[in-house]
Amino acid sequence: MAENPPAGGQQGGRGAAGPGARPAGARSSSALLADHVGSIVAAAEETAQRMIHETEQRVRSRIEEGERAAQYRVDAAEEEAAEIIQSAHQEAARLVAAGHAEGEAAKTSATSEALTIVARAQDNAEATIKEATATATRKTREAEERSRELFQEALSTTTEVRAEGTELAEDLRELGDSLRSNAHRLLRDVQGIHSRMRSQLDRGDGRVTGGRPADAGRERDGRAERERDVRAANGDPLDVPEFIPPQ
C-alpha cells in the first residue's frame, strides 16, 4: 500500500514523457509490478509465518492451559477420591465400632436373657420338684392311712370270722351232742316201744290161750305199761341246742 504513490507518479511521468518514452516506462512498470507482487508475496509470507507462529503459540498456550486444567481436574479428582476414601474409612470405622457396640450389647442382652431363662427354668424345676414331692408325700400318707384302715378292717373281719367260726364250731358241737343224745334217747324209746309191743303181743297170745285170772293180770300190767309210756312221752323232752331258739 505504501508503494502505490510511486506507481501513480510513474503513471504521471508516462503521461508526460509521451509516446517516444513508452518502452522504458513499460519495463519500469513491469519491474515495479514484479517488485510490488514480490513485496506482497513477502508480506503474505511474513503474515502467514506470523499467523502460523501466533497459532502455534496459541495452540501451545491452549495445550498448556488444557494440561493445567486437566492436571487441576486430576488433582481435584485425586483430592476428592482421597476425601471419599478417608470418609469411607471413617464410616467403616464407625460401622465397625457400632457393630462391636451392638455385638457387645447383643451379647450382653443374650447373656442376660439366657441367665433369665436358666433362672426361670430352675425356678420351674424347683417348683415342679416341690409339687411332686408334696404330691408323693400326700399320696404316701394317704396310702399308709388306707393301708392301716384296710389292715384294721381285715383284722376286724378276721376277728369276727374267727369269733363266728368259733361260735359256729361250738354250735355244731352242741348240735352234734344234742343229736347224739336225742338219737340215744330215740333209740331207747324205740327199743322200749318195741319191747312193749312185743310184750303186748305176747300178752295177746296169752289171752287167747289162757283163762280170765291171767287176762285180768295182763290187763293190769298193760295199763301200767301204757301209763309208763305216757309218763315217758310227757316227761323228758328232746335235747335242743342253745343256739336254736325255742318254738
Image (spheres, rainbow, N blue to C red):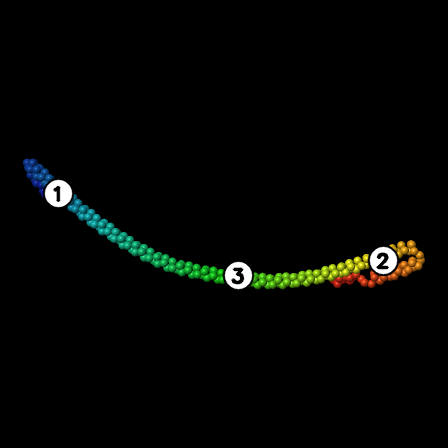
Of the residues under marks 3 and 1, which one precedes in the sequence?
Answer: 1
Residue neighbourhood size for the residue with mark 1, other residues' Cα within 10 Å, grouped as few (<14), some (14–19), many (≥20): few
The Cα–Cα distance between marks 2 and 1, rounded to whole angstroms, is: 213 Å
Q: Which residue is mark 2?
A: 196
How many numbered circles does the render carry?
A: 3
Crowd band around label 2 with a 10 angstrom C-alpha radius: few (<14), some (14–19), many (20+): some
Q: Looking at this view, is 124 or 204 the one in front?
A: 204
Quarter of the image with the N terminus in it: top left
- Where residue 64 appears, as percent x and y from the top left, is 21, 50
Q: Amino acid at mark 1?
A: Ala
Residue 236 figure quarter: bottom right
Q: Is residue 12 visible?
A: no
Examine the rendered structure and indicate whether residue 91 appears above or below residue 48. Answer: below
Quarter of the figure with residue 233 = bottom right
The image's mark for residue 132 is 3
Q: Which one is earlier in the sequence, the residue at label 2 or at label 3? A: 3
> In the figure, 146 relative to 33: above or below?
below
* Image coords of residue 45 (percent x, y): 14, 43
Reading the image, the residue beneath label 1 is: 42
Q: Nearer the viewer, mark 3 or mark 1?
A: 3
What percent of the width, then of the height, locates residue 190? 81, 57
Inspect the image, locate mark 3, and give the three-letter code of the amino acid beneath it: Ala
Residue sitting nearer the eye, 41 or 166: 166
The answer to the question of whether label 2 and label 1 lie on touching residues, with beta carbons closer than 8 A, is no
**Number of the front mark, 2 or 1:** 2
